[in-house]
Image (cartoon, rainbow, N blue to C red):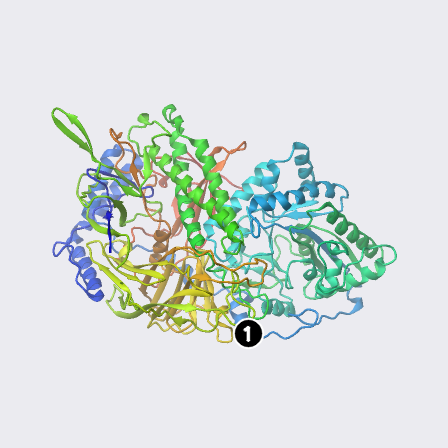
Amino acid sequence: MKLSRQFTVLGSAVFCVVIFSLYLMLDRGHFDHPKSPRREGTFPKGQLSILQEKIDHLERLLAENNEIISNIRDSVINLSESVKDGQKNPEAINFSQGSVSELFPSASVLLAVDSEDCLFSSKSGSHGSGVQMLDIYDILPFDNPDGGVWKQGFDITYNENEWDSEPLQVFVVPHSHNDPGWLKTFDDYFRDQTQHILNNMIIKLQEDNRRKFMWSEVSYFSKWWEGIDSQKRDAVKRLLKDGQFEIVTGGWVMPDEASPHYFALIDQLIEGHQWLEKNLEVKPKSGWAIDPFGHSPTMAYLLKRTGFSNMLIQRVHYSVKKYFATQKTLEFFWRQNWDLGSSTDILCHMMPFYSYDVPHTCGPDPKICCQFDFKRLPGGRVSCPWRVPPEAIHAGNVQHRAWIILDQYRKKSKLFRTKVLLAPLGDDFRYSESSEWDQQYQNYQKLFDYMNSHPEWHVKAQFGTLSDYFEALRKESNLGEKSSNSFFPVLSGDFFTYADRDHHYWSGYFTSRPFYKRLDRVLESYLRAAEILYSLALVQSSKSEKMSGFPSVDNYKLLTEARRNLGLFQHHDAITGTAKDWVVVDYGTRLFHSIMNLKKVITDSAHILILKDKSAYNYDTSTPFLKMVKILNLKEEICLPKDNLSICFCRYLLIYNPVEQERFSVVSVNVNSPRVKILSPLGKPVTVQISAVWDGATTVSHEAYQKINTKEDGKNHQMKVEFAWYGTTSNRDKSGAYLFLPDGDAKPYIFTDPPTIRVAYGRIFSEVVCFFHHVTHTMRLYKVQGLEGQSVEVSNIVDIRGEYNRELAMRISSDINSENKFYTDLNGYQIQPRLTMSKLPLQANIYPMTTMAYIQDAGIRLTLHSAQSLGVASLKNGQLEVIMDRRLMQDDNRGLGQGVQDNKITANAFRLLLERRHGIDKASVSFPSLLSHMTSSFLNHPIIPMTTYADSGVPEMLNTFSPLMSSMPCDMHIVNLRTIQSKVDIEPSDEAALILHRKGFDCRFSNRNMGLLCSTTQGKVKVHKLFNKFKVESLTPTSLSLMHSPPDARNISEISMSSMEINTFRIRLR
């Protein structure tokens, strides 16, 4: 066991003489841990006594500090008033703030939650929708009888004269599905296929104005646009204006809907929509998601907030599709589970058949539809697997061929409520050759001309775009903007977990390539932190000539590149872990480069904000003022001779809290000397714990942690953490990147050598580290007053690189009587109740977890918070299990053509939170507690430490820089403060998008001594009380992705938001 020469300092801290906190979102930076009057730093053995001591400690603090709480509260009010009025100079304010923090971590012990703020969660779920997906799963037998030509459906019949009074309107919608990376990298696909598709599009659409085409991925479109001349650009704009060409969704990619966090989903929508507005002046109005592997209502909500009225989805469980077809509910208004009215309703079309390719889109019989995919004409590179080729249309066969396809159109239309029919015409990377445009468009036009010239057939067929279809549908069903939605059913819930046939559930990809799923979240955290700091630094730099050296354009380019790299990774073959090995490396390289670039944006921006004397600002690329710390070098003390004495300088540590609430946190920094002293901005010592950084191990227990107490009543709850292996089935079809096909229940993780266990005690934290062959498992308890002391930190370093067809799961067992219910989040935005069903195979009971999953009974809730997206299940009463990594030796026949064998050593981070609760949940909706929300926020947005780079003569810095006047309300989250691009080039404008989310929360939990330093305010924030060092020049509401401003948009003085709402505002600061 080798002890490395580095040490970790834990504390809230800085070196030698002074620390500066760049506490971005804080009114007061709390460094100093309150000292316990007795037995400070002792850590009795036994987990029960540890927690008991923490409770005792809290009670002592309460008693000792009770008298001064009111004084502190008054002083805080005075402070914020004086900040507002600007009566005192900033240094005086900082000084008095500092003295507050040294007394007590929080002026408020009982969290102030207004009772009105609790009404939302209690009312939610009572305003039912007609179709609740949880009920559908309950009803369905999930059998799989042979349905005839439509294998997963049924025989469709019709009466010839059904269309006599009202003809069938057919819209054939040509499209090309372009994956931004899958079997080739983004750049290779663009070079080999995509650019040719778009080049041909300009030529071929102009040949006949009845032709239509649509496109969705702006990542590709923008790359193509950069390379074409102004003549082609004008042609594109003309085609868009004439309605021959349509951009659908218009995000950077067509994102996966299981693994991405809503921050990234919004960001890639904004990036796409901003690009379209700037370059094409178009605003997409319909969503098109034909390939994500299951669908989330979060996406429906975000599209609605961008101003969309319609959307389309495709990959839904075949049993659900069949049931919806029998009920004619394939078109519905999708409403959020939590919606108290109908404001979130968006019209959604679900494609009825197996795939989005041509054989599965004209009607129920793929053998016939394939004959109308004219790219497959004899002599071409693709043919029909049903062995009946298409025939080119000519005068001799047009009547017969038109009648055959009309029969398919009629049968398909019988599954819907109107006589308007959508028939997509396309597939992956279609229309890349000029000949294919001719084959499809010319043959179909002959069919249309024949049909339309025979009124006795009662059909009108034409090419269309998605919006052409939805406009006709709304007209036909009398859906005016104002009229009721009663024609179509209302549905709530989600469409996971997807199966395309048999027991082939796509739950493997919820975990596949977990290393990159974690990297994605690290980039998100850095991107948000950088966006906010950059937006503020940009305003600061415009205040004087001295600061004009701030590299605003260079850093904006780095931000734009990071937005686009993160956006690209949300693609449904990227974050999902379902691309070829070298494509995964390409994505990973992009993510990594952007993380490194964002560190520069953060330190450059922090530099300009933290300087006391702004006129001392000097930007020098060769010696940056700040850097992000890996190891702080304390060995080389900087000493300068003066009057026969040497004066030694200290290291400064800046701590940036990227969340909008005050935070009392432990900060970890590696140093190369065990002799460390840390002082607060006021020169007072800060509590530190020095711990070894280990190069290797030295042991682990199978059941690492046995009991957890709830702090409120000290009650004991049995908990057990263990690991287990899943294998893959011995059948022909085996698990792969997409599919999870286990060989039965998981087998216990058995080790031949006894594991090494290492126990560390300290005044700030204590931990148990267990070293197994495939996983290093750590349980850490923080002994601090803040929120971090409320939950157990769990981390695993997983390495299954030597395994063969195995998947490693972490299982948490408890005495909670959860029955067969558990709860998972969707995209970090909302909670979806789940039922573990015995009628389904094991793999169907695995669901995506983006940030949390929980189980509960009438008295307790256990939440697993996650810092990365993974697959999760609750297969037995009181259990939660999460799949941490999978190594699979074969392809699962979904087109990837390889297994998953590029595993890396992967770190997973979690927090385990146990809370007392009271009351029963309604079936369809559930919310986290405020403590749970904040725990998740802190886990996903860790504190960022920086240190001064300069060797000597560091210019004077502010004690704290805090742009916010005070903590935001507990339920308000700043999703982003994102500088908007200017109308020319990639340069910043003087405007930013302020995106806010008001979280829905459940009040039926204790809010005593929870370490929360905020309150709630019914979703109201006064604009003039928002920022401290900046004045809000204007704040106007806009749609989510900035495309639409309400007609009455004006400067507002108060932000008012309903629970669960996400709002975007255009903001100008000075």
Let me know if residue 1035 appears in the view: no
Q: Quadrant of residue 90?
A: top left
- Give the residue pinned by disc 1: 139
Toward the viewer: 742 or 495?
742
Whole-percent x and y of residue 1062?
A: 46, 50
Q: Secondary structure at mark 1?
A: helix
Residue at the image point whose x is 40% and y is 72% from the top: 747
Q: Report the amino acid beneath label 1.
A: Ile
Q: Is residue 752 left or right of residue 725?
A: left
Up/down of 514 relative to 714, above or below:
above
Whole-percent x and y of residue 238?
A: 69, 38
Up/down of 475 relative to 610, above or below:
below
Whole-percent x and y of residue 260?
A: 48, 54
Whole-percent x and y of residue 926?
A: 42, 63
Residue at the image point whose x is 27% and y is 29% from the top: 955
Q: Quadrant of residue 416?
A: bottom right
Q: Is residue 44 left or right of residue 944?
A: left
Q: Is residue 42 left or right of residue 267?
A: left
Let me know if residue 475 appears in the view: yes
Toward the viewer: 620 or 94?
620
